Amino acid sequence: MHATAPSDIQIDTDRLAAPAPHVEAYLAAYLNSRPMPDDLRNAMKYSLLGPGKRMRPIIVIRSCEAVGGAIEQAMPAAAAIEMIHCFSLIHDDLPAMDDDDLRRGRPTLHKYTSEAMAILAGDGLTALAFELIVDRTPDTALAGRVILELARGTNDMVAGQVYDTLGGFDPDLTDQQRLRMIHRHKTGALMLAACRMGGLCGRADDAQLQALTDYAEAVGLMFQIVDDLLDVTQTTEQLGKTAGKDVAQDKLTYPAVLGLDASRSEVERLRVEAHAALDHLGDPATPLRELCEFLAVRTR
């Protein structure tokens, strides 16, 4: 199926969200099985199992299915990437970073507990993600490949956070080039890892893995441009996190650099590009197509 217009794809939101409860149950069971201090476990659960779309683990699962795999094959990787995403949010909200009090409609972890516990919970989730993959993946060669993808995605995400908050760019780059570098690292890196990890879990061949890679690169950038747009067009109540933070902190964003209309045009260009990338995968990639549509029109 090739889609170039929103009317070509009907978004089945129930189907899109279907893997989320399975991921949450898997995460809860793993946390309960792992010896650790109760206050650390509770802090991890507060952030990891709180309200959220579980988009990255869903991408892992749907990518695995798109190449012929099953949800069970993808579950360790799906749970692990949600741990990494959660760690990034916990640390991103800290006073030394974005200094935010609200996340997913609730107090951020350092407000709910303390800065020390938030730092330690984030640290613990990072290491636990890789431990989980090794623990739950019988094929050690596959575990190694999945870990490599997740480690690369995590390190690139950290680099993106550095670009976003501390700089370090080549002085010859334009604002638009800097912006793309921030977004492809800070947000796109974990999207790319999610697609490739899912593909590996489903035993993708080289052509299938390349299709997932191309899809991820388009969707990852599109997602962050939509995020930039929402920050300036939605309220705090609608987003579940503080609106207007990018403007207040004078951050590079697509609306600030290109304007609202050009930013929306870029979302559309990337949406079409993502759909085209999936042509090679046929009907099994339909949930990824629906996910692309959902991410292009989301309101929070």
Image (tube, rainbow, N blue to C red):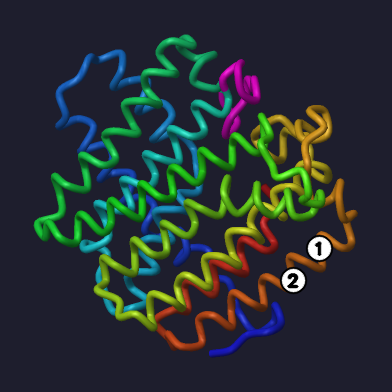
Mark 1 and mark 2: span between their CA atoms? 6 Å
Do residues under tags 1 and 2 come within 8 Å of each other at their CB atoms?
yes
User: Residue at the location (37% across, 18% down)?
Assistant: 120
What range of the chain is rendered magenta? Answer: 94-106
User: Residue at the location (33% across, 44% down)?
Assistant: 24
Q: Amino acid at mark 2?
A: Glu
Task: Tell me the element at label 1.
Answer: helix
Whether residue 262 is visible: yes
Left or right of 165, for residue 245 = right
Left or right of 120, for residue 2 = right
Task: Tell me the element at label 2.
Answer: helix
Tell me the crowding category of disc 1: few under 14, some 14 to 19, or many 20 or more residues within 10 angstroms, Cα based: some
Residue 117 painted magenta:
no
Whether residue 12 is visible: no
Q: From what the image shows, is residue 219 above or below residue 190? A: below
Q: Position of residue 225 (x, y in %)?
A: 72, 54
Q: Which residue is mark 1?
A: 264
Determine the image quadrant of residue 70: bottom left
Q: Which residue is mark 2?
A: 268
User: Residue at the location (31% across, 17% down)?
Assistant: 40
Tell me the crowding category of disc 2: few under 14, some 14 to 19, or many 20 or more residues within 10 angstroms, Cα based: some
Looking at the magenta stretch, what is its main secondary structure?
loop
Determine the image quadrant of residue 29: top left
The one nearer the camera, 212 or 298, is 212
Q: Amino acid at mark 1?
A: Arg
